[in-house]
Image: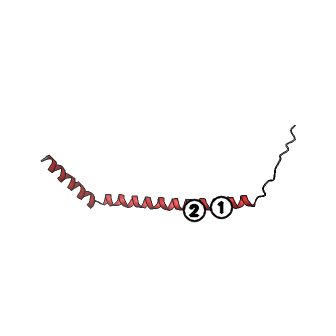
Amino acid sequence: MYFAGKILLQRRFCSRLVAAQRGATAIEYALLIALIAIAATGSLQMIGQHKRATFANAASAMPSGTAISVDDGQP
C-alpha cells in the first residue's frame, strides 16, 4: 500500500509539474541564458582574434634590432 501511494503521489507531482507554468518558464529562461552565453563566447573569440591580428600587424611594422639607450646623466 505504501509503495502504491508513493507512485500515485509521484504521478500527481509529475502531472502538476508538466501543467504548471513555472516549469515552462524556468526552462525558457535556462535556454535563453544558454543562448546568450554561446553568443557572448563566440563574439569574444572573434574580438580576440581581431585584436591579435592588429597587434601582430603593429609588431611587424616596427623596425627590429634597434637598441634604445636611456642616458639619465647619472654615473
Q: Residue at left 45%, top 62%?
A: 35
**69 versus 36 height, above or below:** above
Residue 17: quadrant of the picture: bottom left
Q: Callout 1 environment at 10 Å: few (<14), some (14 to 19), or many (20+)?
A: few
Q: Which mark is residue 44?
A: none
Residue lying at the far left in this picture: please name it: 1
- Which of these two is toward me, 53 or 23? 53
Residue 56 in the figure: left or right of residue 69: left
Instruction: Identify which residue, 36 or 68, lies in the foreground.
Output: 68
Q: Is residue 3 left or right of residue 56?
A: left
User: Is disc 1 placed on a helix, strand or loop?
Assistant: helix
* SS state under label 2: helix
Question: Where is residue 59 drawn, in percent x and y?
Answer: 72, 58
The single residue placed furthest to the front in the displayed view is 65
> Is 71 positioned to the left or the right of 19 in the image?
right
Numbered tag placed on residue 53 in the rendering: 1
Residue type beneath disc 1: Ala
- Identified at 82% across, 49% down, the residue is 68
Residue occupied by mark 2: 46
Give coordinates of residue 75: x percent, y percent. Answer: 87, 37
Q: CA distance from mark 2 to mark 1?
A: 11 Å
Q: Are the two marked residues, 2 and 1, in contact with CB atoms closer than 8 angstroms?
A: no
Q: Quadrant of residue 30?
A: bottom left
Disc 2 marks which amino acid?
Met
Q: In the image, what residue occupies the spot 87% across and 41% down?
A: 73
Q: Is residue 1 left or right of residue 11?
A: left
Residue 12 is situated, as x and y percent measured from the top left of the image, at 20, 55
Q: Position of residue 53 (x, y in %)?
A: 65, 61
Is 45 situated above or below 75? Answer: below
**Residue at image x 23%, y 54%?**
13
